[in-house]
Amino acid sequence: MMLEKTIKKEVSCTGVGLHTGKQIQLSLIPADKGEGIVFVRRDLGGIRIPANAEHVVPSNFATILEAEGATVQTVEHLLAAVSAMEIDNLVIDLNGAEVPALDGSAFPFIALLQKAGLVEQNKKRSFIEILKPIGVSEKGKSVTIHPGSAFEVSCHIDFAHPLIAKQSYHYWHGRSAFISELSSARTFGFLKDYDFLKEQGLALGGSLDNTVVVGEDEILNEKGLRYADEFVRHKVLDLIGDFVMLGKPILGRLEAHCSGHNLHAKLVQAIIENKKAWRIVDMPTATSSSPVCRALPIRIFS
Ligand SMILES: [Zn+2]
């Protein structure tokens, strides 16, 4: 029987918000069994914003949650790390409206969670097992969840830029796979969009320290890319963070074509509404928890 988990002790860090440009303190605090993942806006008297679908605000540049008029944005990289560490219950305390970007990847959050340590709780961990395919699409972009005995992601991107172009990645979700394959993949942006984004009040904290910046014919970061296919790996990371909004870990195979946060949120909503297409199970079937399956991710194309 798998049990729910939280962290052993409180840990903190500070950093700049990618979009707000504000210096923000983040504390990760143990939470009770059954509490789920909850953001708390300490600066607004402790307003609680649960990380689930009913609190997601439509947006394509980052994942945003809202409750009682309070928001928290750019939650996806931290939530991907929380998912990879198989944490079910956690309070994420912030003194501002955005999770710090740190280096633009999920790795610093993994390191923070490892520093905190994990503890099992006296409650069975349950999963959403997908029984029938559910998909959403718009303007040539799509994301579909298919039945599967483990959480897998097939992600395909196609950018009209020669340094990215078409990339695909296939990934089996698990702690060690996430740490080695995805956690260090950073968010990225195009130099040509930078001024426009700033005019819109976005990317105010964006820099070469927390974003892969793609110029016309070169990567502007001094050390270049961390993986040759860092872009598609980051998209898989984003997908995993966005699917935390289901409220439970998922057993199914995600197939994504050029999708973004908005479409991910629509699929999460479609899954929640389509109750005949899934069931709650206590344990993944034997094949899904097989370490062999998780330890042998296959990259189809990069
Ligand atoms: Zn991202």
Image: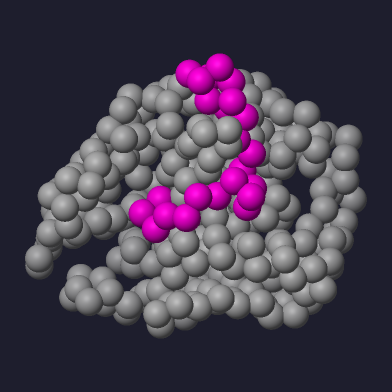
User: What residue range appears in magenta?
Assistant: 39-62
Quarter of the rendering occupied by the C terminus: bottom left
Give whichever of 282, 71 is nearer the camera: 71
Camera-side residue: 154 or 202? Answer: 202
- The reply to whether the magenta stretch includes residue 87 is no
Given residues 130 and 49, the one toward you in this image is 49
For residue 103, say whether it is visible. Answer: no
Q: Is residue 96 left or right of residue 294?
A: left
- Residue shown at the point (56%, 17%) measured from the top left: 45
- Where residue 215 sits, quadrant-wise, is bottom left
Residue at x 44%, y 41% (from the top left corner): 73
- Is residue 161 rendered to the left or right of residue 58? left
Q: Is residue 45 magenta?
A: yes
Q: What residue is shown at x 53% (from left), y 64% (from top)?
A: 264
Expressed as whole percent of the image width and height from the top left, the position of residue 166 reads 32, 79
Question: Can you say whether 79 is above or below 91 in the image?
Answer: below
* 146 sits to left or right of 3: left
- Extreme residue in the front direction: 69
Picture coordinates of residue 203, whole percent (x, y): 26, 44
Point out residue 99 in the picture as x, y percentages from the top left corner: 44, 35
- Residue 228 lies, in percent from the top left, at 30, 66
